[in-house]
Image (cartoon, rainbow, N blue to C red):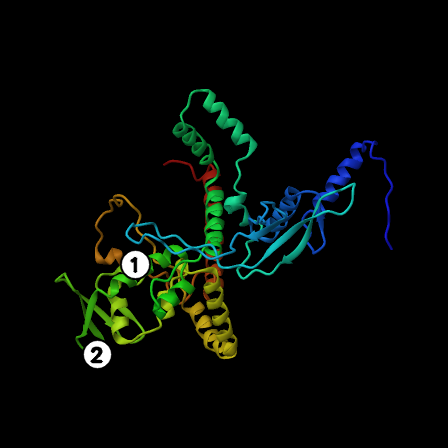
Amino acid sequence: MDTHILFDLNELPVEEDAIEEQSKAKKTICEEPFVGQCFLSEEEALVFYQNYARKNGFSVRKGRFVNKKGERKRRDFFCHREGKSEPKKDNTKKTRTRGYVRCECKAHMRITLRRINEIFPEEWQVTKFVPEHNHVLLSTQEVRFLPSYRNITLEDEKRILLLKEGGLSVRQIMRVMELEKNVDLAIEDVRQKQMHDSMVAKYQELHLKSSSPLEKQGYQVLTPFAFKKFQDQLALAIQYSAWKENDTSFMVKHYEAARLHKVVWDGKMAECTCKNFEFVGILCRHILSVFLHTGCFEIPCCYWLSRWSREEAQFNKVSHLHQEGTLDATSSFADYSDPITNAIELVQCPIISKTKGRPKQKRMKSGKELAKQVKRCRICKSSSHNFSTCPERHASNDANNAQHVAKKSKLDMQSEVDCNPIFHFKC
């Protein structure tokens, strides 16, 4: 059932009502467009589709359509990846290798100008809407790095105008702005860089210079930065000749240079004397040359380091390892439970490290002094027990008590003799 709302055009809305209307407009402005939706102007339709595109992870490009009379009665809003990138016209000029953005995406919205009544003589109506994309859409945190959404803020604009009035040149203004941006926390800058790199990896696709399966494998696994390094090494690998020295050893030589490189390849592990993989983490041209000459069309997974791998490749590797681990979980637990218990028993205190500086000066002792002295019982002089557990302790205590009593009685008798005046008579 249709509901009609009556209102006066001359009545101004209350401030609270205006705020509610703005909040409702913000909520409805990001809804998905539909065929038959009407807009009062072309700009209103563009703003609506831009907000919808930003929420869903892409940006908008405007199409051009003019009829024979020179009138524009139709407008198409395309995805920013619509169309196909044109090939380079002048191959003589050396240009920077850049990833292509357009991938013939068909997502778009078409609006057509129509006349309906006398009150609103013209309005733009949605006549076609295609929401499907043939590429990965960006997240809400990544979409702000697209060129169409990277607008300068009002504060930065005022600051630039203020610096310009102060007489600073464009170069000096840029230095001041960069200095202010560098004041931010380093960890925040790293996060921004990581999000920007992940956005570029989804936004741009790199060109394959050859149809080699090694290059296709590197494109699926490596990050854009690492893949460019891998492409350079693979392009130089065809300039080298390789011959077999024995079962696992190969000699590699450039067609112009006389220097030889030795590559050891046993079908699973490869090693080169240049040590480029150990230093950079990317296979060198010499190992790739051996792969090409021996018919190796798949690089072992141990040579795709995690720091140069895409997030999808790392996730696939972890899920593959998880599947393998669940198959033999019981046997693995049995294999590792015994070594762990044995290792706990074998763990001992570490060796005490020597302190720095000059050691204390001590007197040189003889072997007899350095020998460990055996503790003995002070009653029976035996080494098998001590004073508290000596069996002769009670007998020794009784003898000591008897001696103490006899000694005390003797002292008492002596004191009595000393006190008698008869015994003190001197002859």
Using the image, tell me which numbered label, if any, was put on residue 205.
Answer: none
Using the image, tell me which numbered label, if any, was put on residue 247.
Answer: 2
Give amino acid for label 2. Asp
Residue 217 vertical position relative to residue 99 in the rendered view, above or below: below
Q: Position of residue 310 (x, y in %)?
A: 44, 60
In the displayed structure image, the side of residue 296 where residue 79 appears, left or right: right
Distance CA(mark 1)–CA(mark 2): 29 Å
Q: Position of residue 163 (x, y in %)?
A: 46, 24
Give amino acid for label 1. Asp
Nearest the viewer among 164 and 311 is: 164
> Dot 2: within a 10 Å radius of its alpha carbon, few (fewer than 14), some, or many (20 or more) residues?
few
| Most distant residue in the front direction | 69
In the displayed structure image, the side of residue 28 where residue 135 appears, left or right: left
* Element marked by disc 2: loop
Q: Residue at x 81, y 33 (%)?
A: 13
In the displayed structure image, the side of residue 219 where residue 191 appears, left or right: right
Nearest the viewer among 135 and 7 is: 7
Residue placed under numbered mark 1 in the picture: 232
Query: Can residue 406 be seen by looking at this rendering?
Result: no
For marks 1 and 2, the one nearer the N-term is 1
Q: Position of residue 96 (x, y in %)?
A: 34, 50
Q: Residue at x 47, y 71 (%)?
A: 321
